[in-house]
Image (cartoon, rainbow, N blue to C red):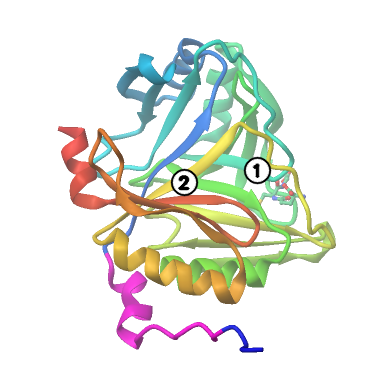
């Protein structure tokens, strides 16, 4: 019997594409049970701005985009409200979004004054010196507050838990062209974290991957959806992703091409742990904003 053909290795030029491409974190997409309630909390307590809203009645959902600056240059959150669905399961794998602020103590007081749920009081991170705090939003999504003198991008992290950190790092390096900008092992607390992205963590948003010693499985729930990242060529990008999934796992869930009706070109895929990323054509995305 003929054996299955080994995958043909793409050219070196194609494999380098993810690091040559114009990549940027665009938004994190997740579902909330009450759009107005979340908009109120994010604008009044967390200090975000409401950037745009859209209602798609034919598909029975609405979106709201919020962040600390315009979508042309900032990472933002894209909230999805599905008509009639008031709660979701966040699962155990999703970690948090993070907000960098010069004064965590002050922000926590402001959040508390607005009725926010502070789950970890401000103070140095266990095993380190950076002042952090944790608060939960009305749906139970966690926001880590991180003390930093200044930052061009306050919405600075998406933290996801993974079952095999080295495999996940390889995937985001090879398939998405990210770099490990920081890695910290805290054996006393039995976890390792890796920050991955396209620039230093003080300058832009990073993906924080957390490995808890011995934990290989998490639940994903149905609340958090995906991260969107910009690309200049969804077709080339998808070819690389497809090749990398053959080595490391994960799979393309949407072949590259325009979204019907919107014409924005995208491709989406799962990493080896099942976390979803969507790559969005940079030029099409800017047209969407106009
Ligand atoms: N078991 C933790 C490992 C990650 C972790 O502990 N991260 C640090 C922040 S980098 C933290 O949450 N520390 C808690 C604290 O300092 O109170 C998890 O899965 O969330």
Viewer-closest of 130 and 9: 9
Stretch of the chain drawn in magenta = 5-21
For the residue with label 2, is its CB less than 8 Å from the closest atom of ligand 1? no
Question: Can you give x and y, in whole percent of width and height, for residue 55 in the image?
Answer: 34, 17
For the residue with label 1, is its CB less than 8 Å from the closest atom of ligand 1? yes
Secondary element type, mark 2: strand
Q: Residues within 10 Å of mark 1 (few under 14, many from 20)?
A: some
Is the C terminus in the top left, top right, bottom left or bottom right quadrant?
Answer: top left
Question: Can you give x and y, in whole percent of width and height, for residue 17 in the image?
Answer: 32, 74
Q: Is residue 263 left or right of residue 117?
A: left
Residue 95, label in figure: 1
Q: Is residue 157 left or right of residue 228?
A: right
State which tag comes first along the sequence, 1 or 2: 1
> With respect to residue 114, does 227 lie above or below?
below
Viewer-closest of 34 and 39: 34
At horizontal 53% and vertical 13% (from top left) the residue drawn is 34
Q: Is residue 214 left or right of residue 137?
A: right
The image quadrant that residue 121 belongs to is top right
Question: Can you give x and y, in whole percent of width and height, for residue 233 in the image?
Answer: 26, 62
Viewer-closest of 95 and 156: 95
Q: Is residue 264 left or right of residue 104?
A: left
Report how far apart the C-alphas of labels 1 and 2 lie in the structure: 14 Å
Residue to which mark 2 is pinned: 227
Q: Residues within 10 Å of mark 2 (few under 14, many from 20)?
A: many
Secondary element type, mark 1: strand
At horizontal 67% and vertical 46% (from top left) the residue drawn is 124
Residue 263, label in figure: none
The image quadrant that residue 14 belongs to is bottom left
At horizontal 65% and vertical 24% (from top left) the residue drawn is 88
Is the N terminus in the top left, top right, bottom left or bottom right quadrant?
Answer: bottom right
At horizontal 52% and vertical 27% (from top left) the residue drawn is 107
């Amino acid at each position: 019997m003929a054996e299955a053909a080994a995958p043909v290795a793409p050219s070196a030029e194609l494999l380098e594409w993810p690091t040559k491409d114009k990549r940027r974190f665009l938004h994190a997409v997740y579902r909330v049970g009450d759009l107005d309630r979340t908009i109120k909390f994010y604008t009044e307590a967390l200090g975000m701005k409401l950037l745009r809203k859209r209602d798609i009645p034919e598909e029975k959902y609405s979106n709201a985009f919020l962040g600390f600056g315009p979508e042309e240059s900032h990472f933002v959150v894209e909230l999805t409200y599905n008509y009639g669905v008031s709660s979701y399961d966040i699962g155990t794998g999703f970690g948090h979004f993070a907000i960098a602020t010069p004064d965590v103590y002050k922000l926590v007081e402001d959040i508390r004054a607005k009725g926010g749920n502070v789950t970890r009081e401000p103070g140095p991170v266990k095993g380190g010196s950076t002042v952090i705090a944790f608060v939960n939003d009305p749906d139970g999504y966690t926001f880590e507050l991180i003390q930093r003198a200044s930052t061009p991008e306050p919405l600075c992290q998406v933290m996801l838990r993974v079952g095999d950190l080295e495999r996940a790092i390889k995937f985001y390096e090879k398939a998405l062209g990210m770099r490990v900008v920081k890695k910290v092992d805290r054996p006393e607390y039995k976890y390792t974290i890796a920050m991955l992205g396209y620039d230093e963590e003080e300058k832009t948003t990073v993906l924080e991957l957390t490995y808890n010693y011995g934990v290989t499985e998490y639940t994903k729930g149905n609340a958090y959806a995906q991260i969107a990242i910009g690309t200049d060529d969804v077709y080339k990008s998808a070819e690389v992703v497809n090749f990398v999934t053959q080595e490391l796992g994960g799979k393309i869930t949407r072949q590259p091409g325009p979204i019907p009706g919107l014409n924005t070109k995208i491709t989406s895929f799962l990493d080896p742990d099942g976390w979803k990323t969507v790559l969005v054509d940079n030029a099409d995305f800017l047209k969407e904003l106009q």
